[in-house]
Image: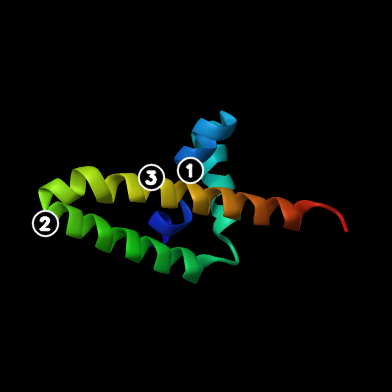
Amino acid sequence: GLWSVYGWFHGYYVADEGQGAWQSMRSSYASVQGAFWRTSFFLAVIAAINAFGLALWFAGIFLAFPVTLMATTWVHLELKRQAQAHQEPA
């Protein structure tokens, strides 16, 4: 469970920054730190949307999947900004 929350965004670091497998997992972990419960709640909501989309096949194709992609990308960018803000010297 923890691995899925902390590692959820690793693919975005591969695609967004060209990081390798291990570095992308470390970046995902760093970005989720401090936002674990909010990220867990977000992933629960996304799971519910996808379950709804799976239950209603038409909605799954045209609603759940695009919503999941847009929401996950937005959260990734927000977590990335937060992680960068914590790394910058004051």
Whether residues under marks 3 and 1 lie with C-beta atoms below 8 angstroms apart, the answer is no
The type of colouring in the image is rainbow
* Residue at point 18%, 50% (across, down): 59
Residue highlighted by disc 3 = 69
Residue 78 is situated, as x and y percent measured from the top left of the image, at 59, 54
| Of 76 and 62, the residue lying toward us | 62
Classify residue 62 as left or right of residue 6: left
Dot 3 amino acid type: Leu
Q: Is residue 63 above or below residue 47?
A: above
Residue under numbered circle 1: 10
Which sits earlier in the primary sequence, circle 2 or circle 1?
A: 1
Element assignment for label 2:
helix
Location of residue 48 in the rendering, given as x and y in whole percent from the top left corner:
26, 63
Give the distance between the C-alpha atoms of the residues marked 3 and 1, in whole angstroms. Answer: 14 Å
> How far is mark 2 from mark 3, CA to CA?
19 Å
Q: Residues within 10 Å of mark 3 (few under 14, many from 20)?
A: few
Element at badge 3? Answer: helix
